[in-house]
Image (spheres, grey):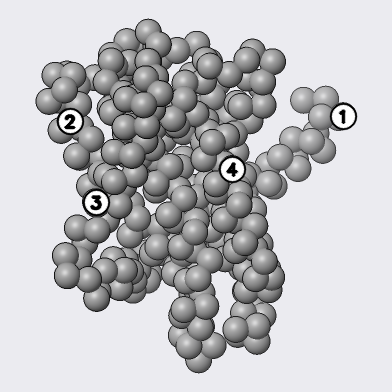
Amino acid sequence: MTDSRRPLYSLLHRVIEAIIGTASRFVDKIVTNRHMLKCLVIRELKSRYADSLIGFTWAIIHPVATVATYTFVFSYVLRSRLGQHAGTNSFLLWLLSGILPWFFFSETIQRSLSILIENKTIITKSVFPSELLLLGNLLANLVKHAIMFIIIMLLVVVIDRRLTYTLLYLPVYVILLSLFTIGLSWCLSAAYIYVRDVGQVLNVAIGLWFFYTPIVYEPSSIPDSLQPLLRVNPLYHIVGGYRTAILNAGIPSEGFYDGMLYLGILSVVVCLLGGAVFKYLKPDFAEML
């Protein structure tokens, strides 16, 4: 190793050690508070449908109604047709496999804004690991995510009559999506306590982000000149990854692994930055709430 490179390697080594140390401490906190986290997840699931007659069934009805609307508009009204690389001839399956991660992402992010405020009594009256509230919200939505995935896979078996080995890619994308989402949740929920306009900005951003992501249209329909801009979007790679895992029976498309690497790096960075922002702002939560 040359003298000129030694400081760079030393800095990189310290950064990696800091990341590993932070991750290790957070995992220890989760293990120590695992019972509390389990209770938070159960409470979160129950509280959303506590006063409704059919309870948790609404968790299925809402996304199904949305998918049915988009399927009718794009498949029957606009008569959209899928290309040869879609992985299926069924617009319904294609839409479901793409909108599945979007529901998880958008619901978790939007719900995260109000969680700290709703639990301000716990935060202000006791020493409480408030970051676990956001993690509990994510895990509660992950339960809904798993249920929707099972329903989609049943439809894939019924309609396309096949399962694909590319399903092995799905856990990777679930983990990366979760890291990206929890990082944003920590950052936005902490910022919302100080600046309530964050909620209005997020509502606009989520609406624009949905159409910026190729969920109801194929990426190939976008001009080549705009493709680099599309690939910057992490949800582009997540939606593509889900469709590859659920629908594709062949070899992943060119650039698939490059996209996975980009998504992996970005998800880890967002998770670490979100955690750092939350930790920095957390000491003043009690006063601001």
User: Which quarter of the rendering shows the C terminus?
Assistant: bottom right
Give the mark toward the camera: 4 or 2.
4
Cα distance, mark 1 to mark 3?
58 Å
Specify which label sits upstream in the sequence, 3 or 2: 3
Residue type for callout 1: Ser
Disc 4 target residue = 208
Disc 3 to disc 2, C-alpha distance? 15 Å
Neighbours of disc 3 within 10 Å: few (<14), some (14-19), many (20+): some
Which structural element holds mark 3? helix
- Contact, CB < 8 Å: mark 1 with mark 3? no
Closer to the observer: label 1 or label 4? Answer: 4
Q: Nearer the viewer, mark 1 or mark 2?
A: 2
Q: Which of the 4 image quadrants contains residue 162?
A: top left
Q: Residue furthest right?
A: 4
Picture disc at residue 60: 3
From this view, report whether residue 278 is shown above or below residue 204: below
Q: Are marks 1 and 4 in contact (CB under 8 Å)?
A: no
Give the answer, above or below, for where 53 lies relative to 160. below
Which one is earlier in the sequence, the residue at label 4 or at label 3?
3
Q: Quadrant of the N terminus?
A: top right
Crowding near the residue tagged with mark 2, few <14, some 14–19, many ≥20 C-alpha atoms within 10 Å: some
Q: Is residue 115 above or below residue 71?
A: below
- The reply to whether residue 35 is in sight is no
* Residue shown at the point (41%, 35%) measured from the top left: 173
First of labels 1, 3 by sequence position: 1
Q: Nearer the viewer, mark 1 or mark 3?
A: 3
Q: CA distance from mark 4 to mark 3?
A: 24 Å
Question: Which residue bears the numbered disc 1?
Answer: 4
* Residue plotted at (46% across, 50% down): 106
Q: Is residue 111 visible?
A: yes
Disc 4 marks a residue whose amino acid type is Leu
Q: Which residue is mark 2?
A: 155
